[in-house]
Amino acid sequence: MLQVLSSAWALLLGMCLLMVGNGMQGTLLGIRGEIEGFSTLEMSIVMSAYFAGFLGGSRMAPSMIRRVGHVRVFAALASLISAVMILYPTFADPWIWTVGRVIIGFCFSAVYVTAESWLNEAADNSNRGKALSLYMMVQTFGIVASQALLLTADPSGFVLFVIPSVLVSIAITPILLSISPTPAFDTTKPMTLRQLSKFSPLGCFGMLILGGVFSAQFGMSSVYAAQAGLSIGQISTFVATFFVGAVLLQYPIGWISDRMDRRTLIIYVAMVGTVGSLIGVAFGHQFAFLLISAFIIGGTSHPLYSLLLAHTNDFLEHGDMTAASGGLVFINGLGAVCGPLIVGVLMENIGPPGFYLYIGVLFIILVGYAAYRSTQRNSIPIDETGAYVVMSQASTTPVSMEIAQEYAIEADLEGEDDSQSE
């Protein structure tokens, strides 16, 4: 771990500041939209726009980097993010915000791709897993820490928009000054979605479902909380609790996943997520229960992402695992784009409980489909399953997915060598 920190501290510090800026602006827009009188449907379009931009950025970033290089892409897009954040309070219009969110989503995606390629260059076979885990921990810490900054000023003013803009501007400094040399950039040609769905129908369907679940959390939780009448402090705590749950439950669920059938565990974890959603529907008027529901939903949806990745890998040859990365990210992105829009329609018609109703229905659908798939194909013996790799949906790109796949392959090969030596 110390070796990873010494070689990539600037990158990790910069990414933490970027995630603080990203997490802060997402929640802040939900609060400010309520202050400006935007409708729930308008805010759902604004929030969905980020994921549309992110999906486009993850597809286009590789060609941009090959054409002009890492440094130019990183510096230009980070500067554009900073500028757009300042423009939000200047032009309080939902359609202008929508365009801004598309731009910011696109830029953040490309920035993540650039930073993750540097991370992969800084790591080697002996510490790639630690580097990836540390990277995910830093990202989640940044999002959680960002919520506390919402308490430093009035959300109806300019200051809270200036803070994330400044943080993003500062974030690029240690990365651009400290990281050398610029790594070579190459991504694996993705497997077609048809091929991928044949290998793992549950993996593909589950990724689509979880895209919708995550985008509801990341995009619409602050909109829900504002409509539910929570204070600024309560909103920041509520949003942060989703990610606290994700951090605390990732590793226990990962430990269990290496010791039981993964499809069965997916069913159980999704059922727990359903219970968390029902708590939110039934007791949404009590803040303590809202925190419990947020903790459960965050603590189940994020590990489910890693579980579905590991389950998909169980049916892939090592040579196909990195090729599957782009397809899985794309499927997850499609679900993420649709999530806020559907939540917005539900909340517009039935009120704030529509937020939890949407998430609960998605969890139930995942439970049903996982149970169905369990009847269609025999389980893989536990001792033949691959490694569980901790992943976060907050900034997953094809590059970070490929890093995770490479680590999973290395872990599998090490396991095979150990068994042969015995």
Image (spheres, rainbow, N blue to C red):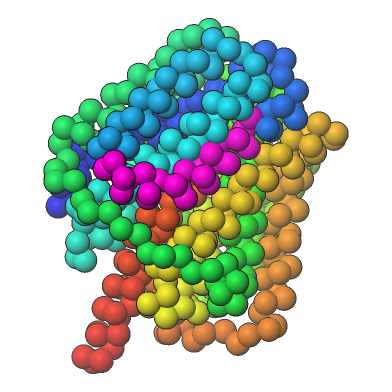
The image shows residue 72, relative to residue 263, as above or below, that is above
Tell me the residue at 37%/39% (across/down): 111
Expressed as whole percent of the image width and height from the top left, the position of residue 150 reads 49, 20
Between 72 and 202, the residue placed more toward the observer is 72
Query: Could you tell whether 252 is left or right of 276 in the image?
Result: left
Expressed as whole percent of the image width and height from the top left, the position of residue 247 reads 44, 48
The image shows residue 219, relative to residue 258, as above or below, that is above
Residue 307 lies within the magenta run? no
Q: Quadrant of residue 201?
A: bottom right
Expressed as whole percent of the image width and height from the top left, the position of residue 227 reads 72, 24
- Quarter of the picture containing the C terminus is bottom left
Between 281 and 209, the residue placed more toward the observer is 209
Residue 55 lies within the magenta run? yes
Tell me the residue at 37%/77% (across/down): 319
Expressed as whole percent of the image width and height from the top left, the position of residue 33 reads 65, 19
Between 177 and 63, the residue placed more toward the observer is 63
Tell me the residue at 58%/41% (across/down): 52
The image shows residue 143, relative to residue 373, as above or below, that is above
Instruction: Read off the magenta span.
Output: 46-70
The majority secondary structure of the magenta stretch comes to helix
Whether residue 25 is visible to the viewer of this picture, yes or no, is yes
Query: Could you tell whether 370 is left or right of 314 in the image?
Result: right
Tell me the residue at 55%/60% (across/down): 304
